[in-house]
Amino acid sequence: MHKAIQILGGCCSSGFVSHRWKPHTGSGLPFVSISAKPLSSSLSRLPSNSSLLAMSSARLSSRFGAFRSRAGHSESNPVGASSSSSSSSVAVQASGSVLKINFCQWCGGPTKHEIPEGEEKIRAICTVCGKITYQNPKMVVGCLIEHDNKVLLCKRKIQPSYGLWTLPAGYMEIGESAAEGAIRETWEEATADVEIVSPFAQLDIPRIGQTYIIFLAKLKKPHFAPGPESSECQLFALDDIPFNSLAFSSMLVTLNLYVEDVKAGRFKFHYGTINKRPGTSPSDIHAFTLDGHLQS
Ligand SMILES: [Zn+2]
């Protein structure tokens, strides 16, 4: 991730422009605080992996409450991790990213937690085979589908965020591209066969170790229906998007940026970092800042 940010930083001088992000004014988002700080300052405020690792698992559980991971997954999926049909599905804002690993993923031996020689972060090191289990961010991929000047949203039939609306999205699988994953998740959650139009947003959420890649897409056929993790799928006109009933901060940001771009008459590619405000509930999707927003 560090390397990626350095690369993007290099882009700033050649095409990307920093932009002060404003929420969709018609959506009633009084708690969204916005900033456009340099990436370096955003990063310096983040807890380090080692400090998070040092937390006991009990403390992590309590901190992230309802968003505790299931079966080793984290939060998010816009359409959760409970269904066998979508082991890849994400839960968008749980703890997930940095969990205390007590056993080696290679041999099952007990681990110790130390900073390996030549590294800077505490890692889970196997006391039997010596291998290190690294934890890295997960990719969440999804589609923002436009049809007849409306966008397709799914109402979640699973926790977390049961009953709230989201774009179809979920964890990317090994062996597929981000675009392929977004198409697959859209089929699983909205039974919609879509064609990717363009990349629209990459949103990092360092606190929970997730990166979202959302594509603009269109329906190949004018058909959609709820998949097993959705209770409803519906096209919304821009003025009717249920901003007060969205499931995740990432979707709130994505849809706000989309509405802004539609009103401006031009779609851009957006990059930014969603930093949850310390001490706020993971379920409070308005308690964040969007830092380092770049747009092409
Ligand atoms: Zn081992």
Image (cartoon, rainbow, N blue to C red):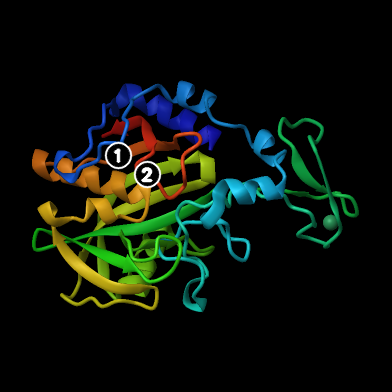
Residue 233 lies in quadrant: bottom left
Picture layout, residue 266 above or below residue 117: below
| Whole-percent x, y for residue 104 in the image | 79, 57
Question: Would residue 225 be found to the left or right of residue 161 on screen?
Answer: left
Picture layout, residue 110 above or below residue 272: below
Q: Residue 182 carries which label?
A: none
Q: Which residue is drawn at 38% across and 67% down?
A: 185
Q: Residues within 10 Å of mark 2 (few under 14, many from 20)?
A: many
Question: Would residue 56 be found to the left or right of residue 208 on screen?
Answer: right
Q: Name the residue under label 1.
A: 270
| Whole-percent x, y for residue 174 in the image | 54, 63
Badge 1 marks a residue whose secondary structure is: strand
Q: Which mark is residue 202?
A: 2
Q: Within 8 Å of ligand 1, the CB of disc 2?
A: no
**Furthest residue toward right:** 128
> What's the residue type where badge 1 is placed?
His
Residue 170 lies in quadrant: bottom left
The residue lying toward the viewer, choosing from 137 and 289, is 289
Callout 1 touching callout 2 (CB < 8 Å): yes
Q: Which residue is drawn at 20% across and 68% down?
A: 234
Q: How crowded is mark 1: few (under 14 residues within 10 Å), some or many (20 or more)?
A: many
